Amino acid sequence: MIKLHDLRPPKGSNKPGKRKARGIGGKGGKTAGRGTKGQRARNTVSIGFEGGQMPLLQRIPKLRGFTNPFRVEYQAINLDTLEETGLTEVSPEILLEHGLISKGALLKILGRGELTKAINIKAHGFSKSAEAAITAAGGSVETLELPWDVRPPHGSFSQHTNR
C-alpha cells in the first residue's frame, strides 16, 4: 500500500532552480537578468506599483453594493407541503414541531400546489396566489405581526448609520 511519505515526483519533473547572481561564470551572473540600471535593477517594486500613479486597486471603490439592514428573511412553505402534512391548523409553532421550519424563522406561505380541504393558517406572510387558494378551499388566513428584533422600529437604526 502506498503511503503519503512514499510519494515522490516523477524523475526529471523537478529541476533545480537557476542560481542567479553568483558571479560571471555561466548564465545569470553580474546583472542576474535584471538588465542595467533603473528601479527594477536595484531593488524590488511592490506588486501593483504604477510608478507614482494612483494604483488601480486604490482607484476602485472598496465597498460595492448595498446591504439592506431592514431585510426580512422568510422561510417559505408551499401549499402542497401543507396538504401532505394533513393538518387543519397551521402556525409557525406547529410547523416547528413537525420539523418543517427552523426555530425563530418567519413563515411565508407560497401558492405552489392545491388544497383539497379547509386549513386555518397563521403566518407572517402570504403570496396572493396562496391566499386565494386557501380562501377558495374554505380555509382562513391570519397574518402575524413581525417581531421588533426582525424589523426595528423607525429611528432605532441611527446608531449603525455611517457618519
Image: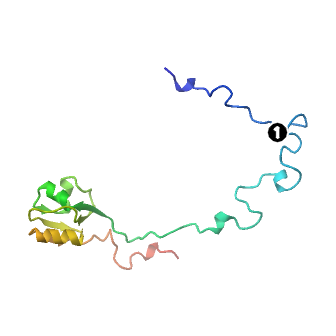
Compared across the picture, whether 111 is left or right of 13 comes to left
Q: Amino acid at mark 1?
A: Lys
**Residue with the most extreme front position:** 113
- Residue 86 appears in the picture as rendered: yes
Residue at image point 33% right, 65% down: 73
Quadrant in the rendering for residue 9? top right
Compared across the picture, whether 26 is left or right of 47 comes to right
- Residue 144 appears in the picture as rendered: no
Residue at image point 83% right, 48% down: 34
Which color scheme did the rendering employ for the protein?
rainbow
x and y percentages locating residue 149 in the rendered image:
32, 68
x and y percentages locating residue 54 in the rendered image:
71, 67
**Residue with the most extreme top position:** 1
Q: How many marks?
A: 1
> Relative to the observer, which residue lies in front, 53 or 135?
135
x and y percentages locating residue 158 in the rendered image:
43, 77
Task: Name the residue tied to disc 1.
Answer: 20
Quadrant in the rendering for residue 33? top right
**Residue with the most extreme right position:** 24
x and y percentages locating residue 53 in the rendered image:
74, 67
Residue at image point 87% right, 39% down: 29
Please, is residue 77 above or below residue 31 in the view? below
**Secondary structure beneath label 1:** loop
> Relative to the observer, which residue lies in front, 101 or 114?
114
> Relative to the observer, which residue lies in front, 122 or 137?
137
- Neighbourhood count class around disc 1 (C-alpha, 10 Å): few under 14, some 14–19, many 20 upward: some
Compared across the picture, whether 68 is left or right of 103 comes to right
